[in-house]
Image (cartoon, helix red, strand yellow):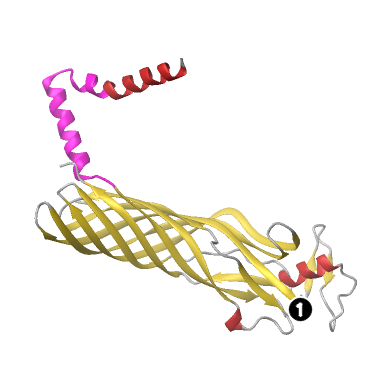
Amino acid sequence: MRKVIFLIVATFILILPVLVFAQSDKEVEQAKSWLGQWKRNYASPTYGMTFFHGNLEVNGYLPNRISDNKGEFSITAVDLRIFRGVNVSKRGGFYTGVETGVLFLAPFEETSFFEPNLGEKMYLDYTGGLVFLMAKYGLRIDLGISLFGVSLGAEVGMGGTLFSGGFDFYTGSSDNRTADVGFGTDRAAMGLILDTALEGAIRIGKNFRIVAKAGILAAPIPMPRSDEKDNYWFDEQGNAHYTWDSGDNNGLTVEEYKRAVMSQYGINIDPFAIDVRIGFVLNFQ
């Protein structure tokens, strides 16, 4: 019974525009005009990955801390976009429009550092999302015949972003953490984004184009910073604990000491990243 109802509703939704536009010749012409604009302004989606570079920062004094050359790591983000504009699906020439999308920070491999004060590995887990909206301009040169061809192009875009996220340091394993300390915020921080890319595409007929894009993306991502002071760790009640004194843990438990050490660290993300994407353009003209 549910399937029958679903089919009836779906059929009604599909034929409703036809019934509406078929009222008169004038309305039919209006519908054709609207569809023509839609075809010229067809949106082109792309999907890919962005690769940022990060490094550890030390907020307080850590004896024998991790050296700079061992505190570097990569940050990956899933890149999802959709582009809408004028002449997006045109065979060649200039095109312009508005692109919106999101970067999901997603670690695809384990990031760890050997921390001398702990005598074991300290792991890093990061999360967050960067939503952006930018104006984009591009130029595409198409080579080939009407049935098949290839194209090359370049584009540049600039706009604004909103970011929210954070990170955790922990010891043990992801499933069984012996100690962890994290910094994050639910508030969205505003920023700017600049995107440049080169495009290569294969055109099949006049109606379908598969595109691949690679370029440099500049998007400052502000990560939260620890509020800890140089050699102190503050518990949930706001009480200050002296972290260490000449190697003495000063009465802290093992977990408290690990958290105190990890709380001195933060991460910094380089705003420049490598971005690679694939997508398609479908032209119904």
Give me the residue at 61% from left, 56% from top: 185
Q: Is residue 91 visible?
A: yes
Give me the residue at 28% from left, 51% from top: 280
Give me the residue at 28% from left, 21% from top: 16
Identify the residue under disc 1: 117
Q: Is 253 placed above or below 247 here?
A: above
Whole-percent x, y for residue 272 in the image = 43, 71
Q: Is 207 placed above or below 108 here?
A: above
Whole-percent x, y for residue 129 in the image = 51, 55
Whole-percent x, y for residue 87 in the image = 19, 51
Does residue 276 belong to the magenta stretch?
A: no
Q: Is residue 45 left or right of residue 192?
A: left
Give me the residue at 19% from left, 44% from top: 40
Q: Is residue 140 visible?
A: no
Q: Which residues are magenta?
A: 17-43
Name the residue at the top extreme: 1
Q: Amino acid at mark 1?
A: Asn
Q: Is residue 183 left or right of residue 216?
A: right
Does residue 28 belong to the magenta stretch?
A: yes
Give the prevailing secondary structure in the magenta stretch. helix
Q: Element at badge 1?
A: loop
Whole-percent x, y for residue 57 in the image = 62, 75
